[in-house]
Image (cartoon, helix red, strand yellow):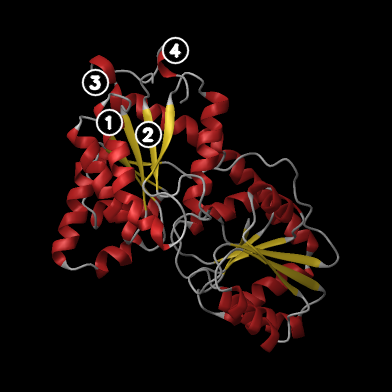
Amino acid sequence: MRAAALAIVAADGVDGQGGIERFVQYLSQQYTADAPELRWFIQKTRFGHGVRRHMTVPLALAQFAWRCASGQVAIAHINVAPQGSTFRKMLFSAVAKAFGVKTMIHLHGSAYDTFYESCPPPVRRLIRRFFASADRVAVLGDHWSKVAREQLGVAPERLLIVQNGVPEPAVMAEPDHEKAHLVFAGELGERKGVDVLLDALKLLNTNAGDWRATLAGGGDIDRFRRQAEEAGVAEKVRFTGWLAEAEMGALMSSADIFVLPSREEAQPIAILEAIARGLPVVSTPVGSIPEQVHNGVSGLLTTPGDARSLAAALERLVRDAAERRAMGQAGRALFLRRYSIRQCAAAFRDVYAEMLAPGAGRRAALKGSEADWSRD
């Protein structure tokens, strides 16, 4: 096998159902399109599905160690989230460092700050050493930059902000239907505020005009279907389960309002997919969402956990198609300025080149002949 430059380390690669997996999918697609000189592969940290996949971490680690030892890796782009993800990625980072591979920690996942604070002091020190060992630490916005500096102890010169990105959609939304279509996308649970959303839809059912809602995502669907029935909105609310990329794109393009009333977030891919299509967004000011959704301009931000404020925001947009269109256009303009996957991928390629520039030898350059650096 010819030498490869880049290992994108992610728990389930592109096979999972979370935002990190979707981001890795989009990033790798863009590298294929725009960077034929770059050799890369996706390194999973576990294989298969279900509980047993956690038992495959040693196998994945051994595979990665062999790739590093045989000179196939110049940079490990390590995608990190709270909880078990952090401790698994510590192992992969240690292996990379042992073989002289440069590492970049890419911090994803909601509530990393509260996760860190919940850990006992010895574990906090371990986490800080993990972040200190990285050649670069990439975060998703100003909020997470502050967390990285003040809690995780990342030196400013090693820290960079790279916004998430999504592809240009094939079909735009037209958010001016007479019967407003509300769309939610994400794991169905309390972290994403699905319980609050259904309480808000109960209030909306008595106060606002005609509407329907689609909730897309895995999770405890039966629980929330029962809540919808108890709230008297079951006939207006559809649960789809998890959707693949094409299906999600079609759903987003049929929407009038995207709603994500999360209690905790990092920088949701789903919001970027919504504004890329020209949808107004109703969400909450947690994580980096205020950087994605400018309150009163491209959407409305409501108090986390507050069904009444959420219902009021939804009612405002359900009743006013002109405002929906105006907010959608503002969000679309923000996407074009900041959140294209093309811009994101280009930013990371620049960082990789910078990381390797001072070195020499087999790991000294990111670019080269197609024979040396084309995609794995």
Residue 192 screen position, x and y as percent = 52, 68
Horizontal arrangement in the rendering, residue 89 relative to residue 171 (left or right): left
Horizontal arrangement in the rendering, residue 262 relative to residue 103 (left or right): right
Query: Residue 68: which numbered mark, if any?
Result: 1
In front of the other: 90 or 343: 90
Q: Nearer the viewer, mark 3 or mark 4?
A: 4
Residue 374 screen position, x and y as percent = 46, 19
Q: Earlier in the sequence, mark 3 or mark 1?
A: 1
Crowdedness near tag 1: few (<14), some (14–19) or many (≥20) residues, C-alpha within 10 Å: many
Give the labeled residue for mark 3: 358
Query: Residue 7: which numbered mark, if any?
Result: 2
Q: Is residue 310 above or below residue 6?
A: below
Q: Secondary structure at mark 4?
A: helix
Instruction: Name the kind of residue labelled 1 in the image.
Output: Cys
Residue 19 screen position, x and y as percent = 50, 53
Q: Earlier in the sequence, mark 3 or mark 2?
A: 2
Instruction: Name the kind of residue labelled 3 in the image.
Output: Pro
Whether the residues at callouts 4 and 1 have beta carbons within 8 Å, the answer is no
Whether the residues at callouts 4 and 2 have beta carbons within 8 Å, the answer is no
Question: Alpha carbon of mark 4 to alpha carbon of mark 2: how far?
Answer: 18 Å
Question: Alpha carbon of mark 3 to alpha carbon of mark 2: how far?
Answer: 20 Å
Q: Residue at x 21, y 51 (%)?
A: 153
Instruction: Name the kind of residue labelled 4 in the image.
Output: Ala
In front of the other: 369 or 329: 369
Q: Secondary structure at mark 2?
A: strand
Q: Quadrant of residue 143 in the image?
A: bottom left
Q: Residue at x 28, y 40 (%)?
A: 62
Q: Nearer the viewer, mark 1 or mark 2?
A: 1
